[in-house]
Amino acid sequence: MTCELYFETGDCDPTELFQSKVVKGRKDYKCCECYEIIPKSKKHESASGLSNSEFWNYRTCNACCEIRDEYTRDGFIFGALWEAMNEDCREMPLDSLDTFSPEAQQKLLIMLD
Ligand SMILES: [Zn+2]
């Protein structure tokens, strides 16, 4: 398990340095969760930090961010959103899908088997 990239929403944060912000890409990026291309100049989340003296940076598209915020309140691992979602999808309140943006709803339908 990659402990160093696990974020607790509580007071314990094993990461030495962490920041997350919404940016407009200056080039194409790949979403770390769904692996889709985030086109240049589209707004997305850029998270970067320093763990064990190594810098890392993860880009997440808006749809994945929205879903991650909703379903992983207890913490998450970058790149593991859809694995976790597929494991838990039976418990998912699918009737609450309308609270998501059309983009995120589309993503859920594509990514969940
Ligand atoms: Zn994505």
Image (cartoon, grey):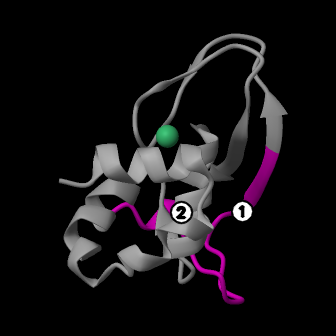
Which is closer to the viewer, label 1 or label 2? 2
Q: What residue did someone put label 1 on?
A: 16
Q: x, y percentage for residue 88?
A: 26, 75
Q: x, y percentage for residue 10?
A: 67, 89
Q: What residue did someone put label 2 on?
A: 68
Horizontal arrangement in the rendering, residue 55 relative to residue 68 (left or right):
right
Considering the image in quadrants, where does the N terminus appear? bottom left
Q: Which residues are magenta?
A: 1-21
Distance of mark 1 from mark 2, alpha carbons?
22 Å
35 drawn magenta: no
Rendering quarter of residue 11: bottom right
- Foreground pick, 106 / 60: 106
Horizontal arrangement in the rendering, residue 83 relative to residue 9 (left or right):
left
Vertical position of residue 56 compared to residue 36: above or below: below
Count of numbered labels shown in the rendering:
2
- Foreground pick, 74 / 103: 103
Residues at circles 1 and 2 in contact by the CB criterion of under 8 Å = no
Q: Amino acid at mark 2?
A: Arg
Vertical position of residue 10 compared to residue 17: above or below: below
* Label 2 SS: helix
Residue at 34 percent across and 78 percent down: it is 92
Q: x, y percentage for residue 109?
A: 33, 50
Horizontal arrangement in the rendering, residue 62 relative to residue 2 (left or right):
right
Rendering quarter of residue 12: bottom right
Residue at 39 percent across and 53 percent down: it is 108
* Label 1 SS: loop
Mark 1 or mark 2, earlier in chain: 1
- Foreground pick, 53 / 87: 87
Q: Amino acid at mark 1?
A: Glu
Vertical position of residue 28 compared to residue 106: above or below: above
